Amino acid sequence: MSASRGVSFISGAQLLSLKRRPNIAIIDVRDDERSYDGHIPGSLHYASDGFSDRMSDLVRAVRGKDTLVFHCALSQVRGPTCARRLANYLEEMKVDEGIKNILVLEKGYNGWEASGKPTCRCGDAPCNGHGIQ
């Protein structure tokens, strides 16, 4: 693992085309708004509030995934910040769980929803996609 691991952006269309692959995990780092705005089907919820304290839990939860896609509402602050925190954590802890790509969803959840991509309103954690709209 190289210390220069960067965080890149992925478009909603790119994510939609990759989403069905079993090696991708979508990480929603919004705080309370997830509960009333809905979420991307199948996403995991690790609120930015307290994200640093839950990184080891996240690494366990995504075991077997090689691509993690982070997002918040607009992916301007919380999403990129949490993605960088995880990349730094993996470096510092010398953890190699097979995570090769850490990405941030362009325009966040708001852009995803506004472009008509599938959303879910289930209250399950993790989301099982049963409340898709």
Image (cartoon, grey):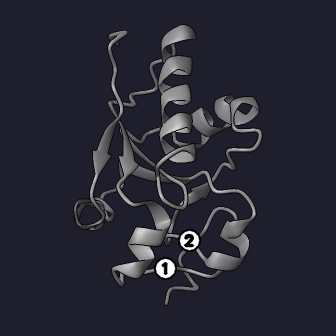
Image quarter for residue 66?
A: top left
Label pair 2/1, CB-CB below 8 angstroms: yes
Q: Which residue in the protein does label 2 denote?
A: 39
Report x, y in % for residue 124: 70, 71
Which residue sits at x=56%, y=19%?
89
Question: Quick one: which residue is furthest to the front in this view?
Answer: 76
Q: In this view, does 114 lie above or below 68?
A: below
Q: Nearer the viewer, residue 50 or 127?
A: 50
Q: Is residue 13 left or right of residue 2?
A: left
Kind of residue indicated by mark 1: Thr
Percent position (x, y) of residue 128? 57, 72
* Percent position of residue 46, x then y: 66, 48
Q: In this view, does 75 lie to the left or right of 61?
A: left
Residue beneath the point at 61% across and 51% down: 29
Q: In which quarter of the image is the N terminus?
A: top left
Q: In this view, does 36 lie above or below 23?
A: below
Dot 2 amino acid type: His
Residue displayed at 71% across by 78% down: 36
Q: How many C-alpha atoms fall within 10 Å of the one at disc 2: few (<14), some, or many (≥20)?
A: many
Q: Mark 1 points at which residue?
A: 119
Residue 113 versus residue 27 in the image, above or below: below
Q: Which of 29 and 61 is in front in this view?
A: 29
Horizontal side of residue 60 vs 71, given as left or right:
right
Disc 2, SS:
loop
Q: Earlier in the sequence, mark 2 or mark 1?
A: 2
Badge 1 marks a residue whose secondary structure is: loop
Asked where in the image residue 8 lies, by quadrant, the reply is top left
From the top left corner, tell me how far across and down residue 3 is, in percent: 37, 9
Q: How crowded is the residue under tag 1: few (<14 C-alpha within 10 Å), some, or many (20+)?
A: some
Determine whether, in the image, residue 82 is placed left or right of residue 110.
right
Farthest residue toward the bottom? Answer: 133
Q: How far apart are marks 2 and 1 (CA)?
A: 5 Å
